[in-house]
Image: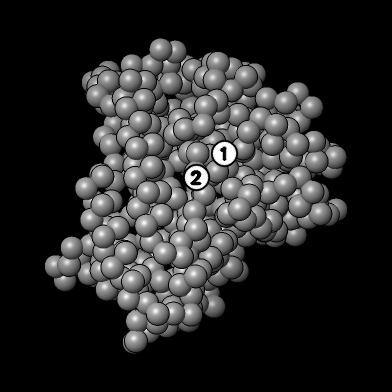
Amino acid sequence: MSGNHLSNRVLSLSESATLAMTRRGRELKEAGKDVISLSIGEPDFDTPMCIKEAAIEAIQNNITHYSPVAGYKELRAAIAAKFKKDNNITYKPEQIIVSGGAKQSIANAILCLVNPGDEVLIPAPYWVSYPEMVKMADGVPVIIPSTLENDFKVNPQAVREKITDRTRLFLYSSPCNPSGTIFTRDELRALAEVLAEKKDLYIISDEIYEEINFSGAHESMAQFDFIKDRVITINGVSKGFAMTGWRIGYAGAPLDIAQAMNTLQGQYTSGPSSISQMAALIALKEGACAMDEVCKMKKAFRERRDLVLGLLKKIPGVKTNVPEGAFYVFPDVSSYYGKTDGTRIINNGMDLCMYLLDTVYVALVPGEAFGCDECIRISYATKTSEIQRAFERIASALAKLH
């Protein structure tokens, strides 16, 4: 049957560039090959015990019924307190919406603010779902490129040049997936000053990797009084607390936008899991029991980052910067484009990733998926021994290209 019975909305969405890699990696594993994945976007640690115990207690106490659409008030109050303490942002509990992951929080905000034809500014490299979410709202993604030499940071002038009468949103992440880039306070202020010039332009600040920060203090755009009423701050417990499967994200927003997100969410998912919310409450409470575990995870990620950077330096033709957060390195590998192993030509990042997967069984993600085809994304959310084994294979395979 042809696809012409499907909606234009779903037909406009692109298939993820990572799906071919995932599918091929699965086929190779099923064939008995020793595939090492450096493509995964989640911590390889387990959820801290005290958080799991809170979930078990919630079940035993029969907290297993529908929750309010926006989440339990106690959790929203804890999130508001976290924003105040950690980010210097003042939100009331009624300005907080808890959702089934930060991805839903971002989609909620986009769907509440973007009309057909509205433009959304997205710095590249970007998380793979940003442009597709904009398309889902019948908006137009407008990509602002950046360079490795500038640590993948867009400058205010480049942003100003992309703003038009149709610009509605600016959507970015810090720390960034895939680059690990972190904006400083001064850099965020400079961007905010440009964005503030257009009075009906809103900002979605994706801060899901906040806890995985090697550079010092995390900074949020909503801390600036002159722009805070136009910023939707997105966060969650998935990355920092190793709770990806619990599916809890949240947004802090101006009250009218929060109310709109509540209305929207009430019509297509209602409130997130009651049990997961009780687990998230323990994670986010003042003096959270899990913070020692969070610090250990952060230390391990930093050590792995340094290991990966050291291994990449030994490979000719690869350029890297020093990512300050998340758990990714995003090197420029374009010096290998146009080369061949005698049987295939490497034309782009997808070709290079498929070559490494097919010949040495290492799974990576091509930069094309993130709007930057010169690069590939390497995740170091896996144990050190696997990283070392993978890089031995990568170096060997790249040495065969000429």
Residue depicted at 48% across the width and 75% down the height: 337
Left/right placement of residue 377 relative to residue 398 reads right
Q: Quadrant of residue 85?
A: top right
Placement of the C terminus among the 4 image quadrants: bottom left
Q: Secondary structure at mark 2?
A: loop
Residue depicted at 56% across the width and 62% down the height: 372
Q: Nearer the viewer, residue 90 or 44?
A: 44
Tell me the mark number nearer the camera, choosing from 2 and 1: 2
Q: Secondary structure at mark 1?
A: loop
The answer to the question of whether label 2 and label 1 lie on touching residues, with beta carbons closer than 8 A, is: no
Q: Which residue in the structure is indicated by mark 2?
A: 322
Placement of the N terminus among the 4 image quadrants: bottom left
Up-down: is 182 above or below 279? below
Residue depicted at 66% across the width and 58% down the height: 145
Say the numbered circle drawn on residue 182: 1
Mark 2 residue type: Val
Left/right placement of residue 5 relative to residue 43 reads right
Say the numbered circle drawn on residue 235: none
Mark 1 residue type: Ile
Residue depicted at 75% across the width and 59% down the height: 117
Residue furthest to the bottom in view is: 343
Q: Position of residue 307 (x, y in %)?
A: 34, 45
Q: Position of residue 248 (x, y in %)?
A: 43, 34
Q: How many marks?
A: 2
Up-down: is 299 above or below 76? below
